[in-house]
Image (tube, coloured by chain):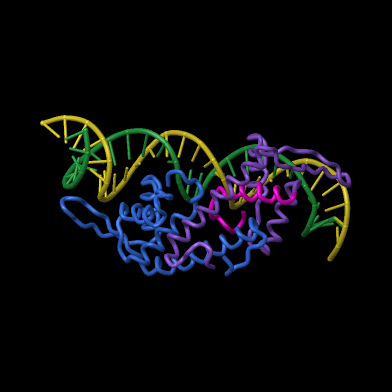
Chain colours: A purple, B blue, C green, D yellow
Amino acid sequence: MSNNNLIKGSLQTIILKLLEENDKMYGYEITQRVKELTEGEIKITEGALYPALHKLEAEGMLTTEIQQVDNRVRKYYSLTKNGHKEVSAKMSELQSFVGNLQRILDPEWKPGLA
Amino acid sequence: MSNNNLIKGSLQTIILKLLEENDKMYGYEITQRVKELTEGEIKITEGALYPALHKLEAEGMLTTEIQQVDNRVRKYYSLTKNGHKEVSAKMSELQSFVGNLQRILDPEWKPGLA
DNA sequence: TTATATACATAAGAAAGTTGGGTATTATTT
DNA sequence: AAATAATACCCAACTTTCTTATGTATATAA
């Protein structure tokens, strides 16, 4: 992420969730999708993304498949069985963390209310 | 923080916000307040807290005042003028980041709705 | 032809945590 | 009485995760 330096550790969750929704994505595509979804506010840097993808692959969460498109090599990633399980785990971890953050930072906050 | 490894980057904001609400707090008190507010789910470790407090003080966001309470030394922290400004900055940074996170992870999500 | 976009990758360094230790007093349990 | 837990501060080694900078290569637009 470029300008934002907040909540280290959420990149893995982002990658896993996007792959759950899209079944198959390549690195560059992920950076563009995140940029789109946040209207340019979050930019995933390649220096952060590729190591994260390699780590998730090494941990058995992702598998890769190389495709040739117009003389350009693309490395497609998709979730493994363990990867699918991990998505739910990471998602609820993150949601509960964000909930706790709200409880600390906004005492008025109640879950399910704005 | 103990079980959670997601907090990176938000600790400073937590400290600043709690001090804005409470005017004057000492380190141990902050750990207890966070534990209370999150029902034990987030535990700030001393190894994270004290360096963060010292850094914020060095940056001119906090001032300290030592008090003796029952033969025990307490180091009270409070916001400086710059510290007060920084609270709003950090808060909106964090809120916008959480908003972007939601946009990525939950495509159904709209601000102001649950 | 020079810059931008696409597409991958690595490596040095910074930042912010965790883990584990240390010191000291007071309160509670066994 | 002794051991443990709670209160209250601190530091240092290590790890993880990111930023910044760099490298390679092809395709397209100015």
- The residue depicted at 89 percent of the width and 47 percent of the height is A70
Number of marks:
0
Q: Is residue A9 magenta?
A: yes
Which portion, as a residue range, is magenta?
Answer: A1-22
- The residue depicted at 32 percent of the width and 66 percent of the height is B23
Question: Where residue D17 sits in the image (x, y, percent)?
Answer: 57, 45
Q: Where is C12 relative to D9, above or below? A: above
Q: Is residue B105 left or right of residue A67?
A: left
In the rendered image, which quarter contains the C terminus of chain B?
bottom right
In this view of the protein, which residue sits in the foreground, B79 or D8? D8
Q: Which image quadrant for residue A63?
A: top right
In this view of the protein, which residue sits in the foreground, B58 or B33? B33
- The residue depicted at 65 percent of the width and 51 percent of the height is A45
Question: Where residue A31 sits in the image (x, y, percent)?
Answer: 70, 53
Q: Is residue D13 left or right of residue A14?
A: left
Question: Where residue A94 sits in the image (x, y, percent)?
Answer: 55, 51
- The residue depicted at 45 percent of the width and 65 percent of the height is A106
In this view of the protein, which residue sits in the foreground, A88 or A52? A88
Q: Which image quadrant for residue A34?
A: bottom right
Q: Where is B34 relative to C23, above or below? A: below
